Image (cartoon, rainbow, N blue to C red):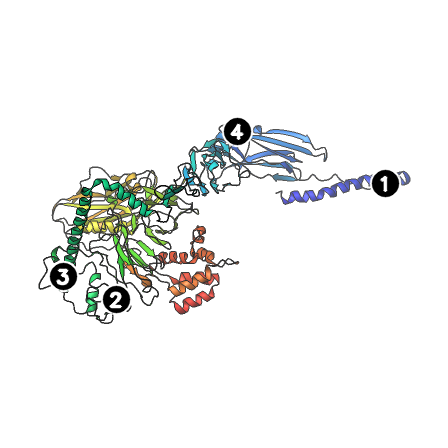
């Protein structure tokens, strides 16, 4: 853009020409008049003013490749002088190469100048601004400045930030190959090679290269089986990623059955088929089922002939064969009779054992088969010898159903839910109840008939939580239930919520997740660090506890929401983390489920990330954990807690010790340390202090200072202690701590004052100011309350949800259908901050319902209906807001 004075001179140009023409005409006229009148004019017009310089060529941005200098040029007219100014300083006149010429059209002087900029000049520049130069041109009318041209050193790093990975995909499946080129200046351009040929999406519409340089194959074809390479290039270099091999496999399929063969001598005919439609290719699965099929071809008409032929064939054996047959029949009959007698005796003894109990009415008799796991039978005067060795009743369960049929929690004397006495045997099971306990260690279910589950009025709620069988375990034997690290509940179609108190871990099971009429014993377990393999590998770090939820293999009608606390520091302006959710297979190996920000339609989960926790929407129960690694160029930071502990009891010896723990900033990690120190007799001296631990490969250094040396001395030989970086970053050793051992000069010394400094080398740190009386019993110090600590371990049915089902259904009915104005579930997702990947919700039968499930999980501590009401109000859904105001309590 030229300056205003320059535009003003351009506007005067035509006027100057007009004056020149007028002057010439006037001269001719005056000449003719002079000859006649012989009179000279009083004055002659002056020469026109010279305009401001105008740049015909301005300097352009340039890159220094290796050590080759760059040339900057500019050209202006009219110009008496042109000089370069770089970074605010004039370039020496001797460093300019100047050329002059004359514009044949205007007759004005054109001046061109050129300077050279070297790599050394650019590297010697200090400051945040890049190296820049601009031209300044002079004329008699003034000066004009060109635009700035920036000179940068070109480079292209060697390592790709992300390289494509080989995959095996089925035919017509969508394929995503990711590539993040190396950092470079200028930014690298990316090409994709297929077997060393450049992929051109304009020539093959099945390929798509995204703005993030990822390659998408819309529908995998057999001809797409190839080696794919990502190539990054700029003016300085060309880099190739590792090659990813893509294999497109085809599962086999049957052809139609061939025609039946002719009827054979054995009264059968057969037909066959082949696994050729299509034929399995590239490792695809072979067809399941039989290749041949046979059946009777006479509809049983030749069965008699077959029997006669068998008799004739067996006749030569004579009486010996007949005796053997009859002997076998007699033995089988005797064994059957003995077996029936044994079953009858066992049934009789079982009935007698139950009749010896103190049965006060039919309610207690009918509920005898449904005692909770902690039930103790009544004391009997004449105990049967078999009672002490009787096996536990694996069909026993615990739960409460309010309705006319039965009650599993009321005592025997509670009359409202008793079943009236009938003439049927006392130990007959309830005719309308069927309980199934599967032998699989990971699955249990309890089914109710359809007529019993047809209305909410018959089963209003399921409050009580119990265990099906006093010694029954419903998960993998490798999952141990540690006290305070697990919870379980029997859930049905009404859903519920499992919470492990003081850990930040919970599982939300929305209504309708479990099929109607089924009940499952669901569990939630935090794995101990010493009893599980960690999901991190390479430079990854574990950011959350490893949590198992089950039973695995359970069929879910809609996603559940697993909430995990994490310790990633996320409040930086640029993303520093690459976060990945992993799951553990039955063989113990860890597999990636999804990477945040790289979701696709094939992603099985959705992860909603918050500052201190994440919520995972998933449809497959199992073992999960969150890991992360630094996202270049910035190193990521983990949130840690530093907890200082001392002996609670008075010190009776000369020795005294202090322990400082370095743990992840999650409620579960702090709870684990508090429980450990409580067992060791330690007490927390003050609230844990936060520390940001950077991925910088520097250790954590701990030191003690300002010890009163007249009364105390430190037993530490070195000036400080260090915890290696990798031990903290990987999360492989937990909990980590250092001990400072002190010795006082005499038993009369009771006061201790000192400082303990904890910091990462070349990083952040914290200081503990300690002043204590070691002769007193230290009171227990409760840390600051963590989120979710006041929640019960389990909530069942409608009690687990803040949003009433009627209001929830009306919101879904109002927002599920797409709106031309966009005022539908998508706008609700944006208002609630759940819009990072909307395609996940779009694939669900009720996107609004899944969004509300996620909202319930995010607000389990506060149940803030105001935020939901505000979002609906901003959307203009006043009719739903009225329902919430009248039916809810927002």
Residue 29 tag number: 1
Residue 353 tag number: 3
Tag 1–tag 2 contact (CB < 8 Å)? no
Residue 69 tag number: 4
Mark 3 or mark 4: which comes first in sequence? 4
Q: Nearer the viewer, residue 790 or 492?
A: 492
Tag 4–tag 1 contact (CB < 8 Å)? no
Mark 4 or mark 1: which comes first in sequence? 1
Q: Which numbered mark, 3 or 4, is in the foreground of this view? A: 3
Q: Which residue is mark 2?
A: 406
- Residue 838 appears at what percent x and percent y? 45, 52
Vertical arrangement, residue 403 with respect to residue 195, above or below? below
Q: Can residue 708 be seen here?
A: no
What is the C-alpha distance between the residues marked 3 and 2?
23 Å
Q: Nearer the viewer, residue 307 or 573?
A: 307
Mark 1 or mark 2: which comes first in sequence? 1
Q: Which numbered mark, 4 or 1, is in the foreground of this view? A: 4
What is the C-alpha distance between the residues marked 4 and 1?
61 Å
State the quadrant of the N terminus. Answer: top right
What is the C-alpha distance between the residues marked 3 and 1?
144 Å
- Residue 24 appears at what percent x and percent y? 81, 39
């Amino acid at each position: 853009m030229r300056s205003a004075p320059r535009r003003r001179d351009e506007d005067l140009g035509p006027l100057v020409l007009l004056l020149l023409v007028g002057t010439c005409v006037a001269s001719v006229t005056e000449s003719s008049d002079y000859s006649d009148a012989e009179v000279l004019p009083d004055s002659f017009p002056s020469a026109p003013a010279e305009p401001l310089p105008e740049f015909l060529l301005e300097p352009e941005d340039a890159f220094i490749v290796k050590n080759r200098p760059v040339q900057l040029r500019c050209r202006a007219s009219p110009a008496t002088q042109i000089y370069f100014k770089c970074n605010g300083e004039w370039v020496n006149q001797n460093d300019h190469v100047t050329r002059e010429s004359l514009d044949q059209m205007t007759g004005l002087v054109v001046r061109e100048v050129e300077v050279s900029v070297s790599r050394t000049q650019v590297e010697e520049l200090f400051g945040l601004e890049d190296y820049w130069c601009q031209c300044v041109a002079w004329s008699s009318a003034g000066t004009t400045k060109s635009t700035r041209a920036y000179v940068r050193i070109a480079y292209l790093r060697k390592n790709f930030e992300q390289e494509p990975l080989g995959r095996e995909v089925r035919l017509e499946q969508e394929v995503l190959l990711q590539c993040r080129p190396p950092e470079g200046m200028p930014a690298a351009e990316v090409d994709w090679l297929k077997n060393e040929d450049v992929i051109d999406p304009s020539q093959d519409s099945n390929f798509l290269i995204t703005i993030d340089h990822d390659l998408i194959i819309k529908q995998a074809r057999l001809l797409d089986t190839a080696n794919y390479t990502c190539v990054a290039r700029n003016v300085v270099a060309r880099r190739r990623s590792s090659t990813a091999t893509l294999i497109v496999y085809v599962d086999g399929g049957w052809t139609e059955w061939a025609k039946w063969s002719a009827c054979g001598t054995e009264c059968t005919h057969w037909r066959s088929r082949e696994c050729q439609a299509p034929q399995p290719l590239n490792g695809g699965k072979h067809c399941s089922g039989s290749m041949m099929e046979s059946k009777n071809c006479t509809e049983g008409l030749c069965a008699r002939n077959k029997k006669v032929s068998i008799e004739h064939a067996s006749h030569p054996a004579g009486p010996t064969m007949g005796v053997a047959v009859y002997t076998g029949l007699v033995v089988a009959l005797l064994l059957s009779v003995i077996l029936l007698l044994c079953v009858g005796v066992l049934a009789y003894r079982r009935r007698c054992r139950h009749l010896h109990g103190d049965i006060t009415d039919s309610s207690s008799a009918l509920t005898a088969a449904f005692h909770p796991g902690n039930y103790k039978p009544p004391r009997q005067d004449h105990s049967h010898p078999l009672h002490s060795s009787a096996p536990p009743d694996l069909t026993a369960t615990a739960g409460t159903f309010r309705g006319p049929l039965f009650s599993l929690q009321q005592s025997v004397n509670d009359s409202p839910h008793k079943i009236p006495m009938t003439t049927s045997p006392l130990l007959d099971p309830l005719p309308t109840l069927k309980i199934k306990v599967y032998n699989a260690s990971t699955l249990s279910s309890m089914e109710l008939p359809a007529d019993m589950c047809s209305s909410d009025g018959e089963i209003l709620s399921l409050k009580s939580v119990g265990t099906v069988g006093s010694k029954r375990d419903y998960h993998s034997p490798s999952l141990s239930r540690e006290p305070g690290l697990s919870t379980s509940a029997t859930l049905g179609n009404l859903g519920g919520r499992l919470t492990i108190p003081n850990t930040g871990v919970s599982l939300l099971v929305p209504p309708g997740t479990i099929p109607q009429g089924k009940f499952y014993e669901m569990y939630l377990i935090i794995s101990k660090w010493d009893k599980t393999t960690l999901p991190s590998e390479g430079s990854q770090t574990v950011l959350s506890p490893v949590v198992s939820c089950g039973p695995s293999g359970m069929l879910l009608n809609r996603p559940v929401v697993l909430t995990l606390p994490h310790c990633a520091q996320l409040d930086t302006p640029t993303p520093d983390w690459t976060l990945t959710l992993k799951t553990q297979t039955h063989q113990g190996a860890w597999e990636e489920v999804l990477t945040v920000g790289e979701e696709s339609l094939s992603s099985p989960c959705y992860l909603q990330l918050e500052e201190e926790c994440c919520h995972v929407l998933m449809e497959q129960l199992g073992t999960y954990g969150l890991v992360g690694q630094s996202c270049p160029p910035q190193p990521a930071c983990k949130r840690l807690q530093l907890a200082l502990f001392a002996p609670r009891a008075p010190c009776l010896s000369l020795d005294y010790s202090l322990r400082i723990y370095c743990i992840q900033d999650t409620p579960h990690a702090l709870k684990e340390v508090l429980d450990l120190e409580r067992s060791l007799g330690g007490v927390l001296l003050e609230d844990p202090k936060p520390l940001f631990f950077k991925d910088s490969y520097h250790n954590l250094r701990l030191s003690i200072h300002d010890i009163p040396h007249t009364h105390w001395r430190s037993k530490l030989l070195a000036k400080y202690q260090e915890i290696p970086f990798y031990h903290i970053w990987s999360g492989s050793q937990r909990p980590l701590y250092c001990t400072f051992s002190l010795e006082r000069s005499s038993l009369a010394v009771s006061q201790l004052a000192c400082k303990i400094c904890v910091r990462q080398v070349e990083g952040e740190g914290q200081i503990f100011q300690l002043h204590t009386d070691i002769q007193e019993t230290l009171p227990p110090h409760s840390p600051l309350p963590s989120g979710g600590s006041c929640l019960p371990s389990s909530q069942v049915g409608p009690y687990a949800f803040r949003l009433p089902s009627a209001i929830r259904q009306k919101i879904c009915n109002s927002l599920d259908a797409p709106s031309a104005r966009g005022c539908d579930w998508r706008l609700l997702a944006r208002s609630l901050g759940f819009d990072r990947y909307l395609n996940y919700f779009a694939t669900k039968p009720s996107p609004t319902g899944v969004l509300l499930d996620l909202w319930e999980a995010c607000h389990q501590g506060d149940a803030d209906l105001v935020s939901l009401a505000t979002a609906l109000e901003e959307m203009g859904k006043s009719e739903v807001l009225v329902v919430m105001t009248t039916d809810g309590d927002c």
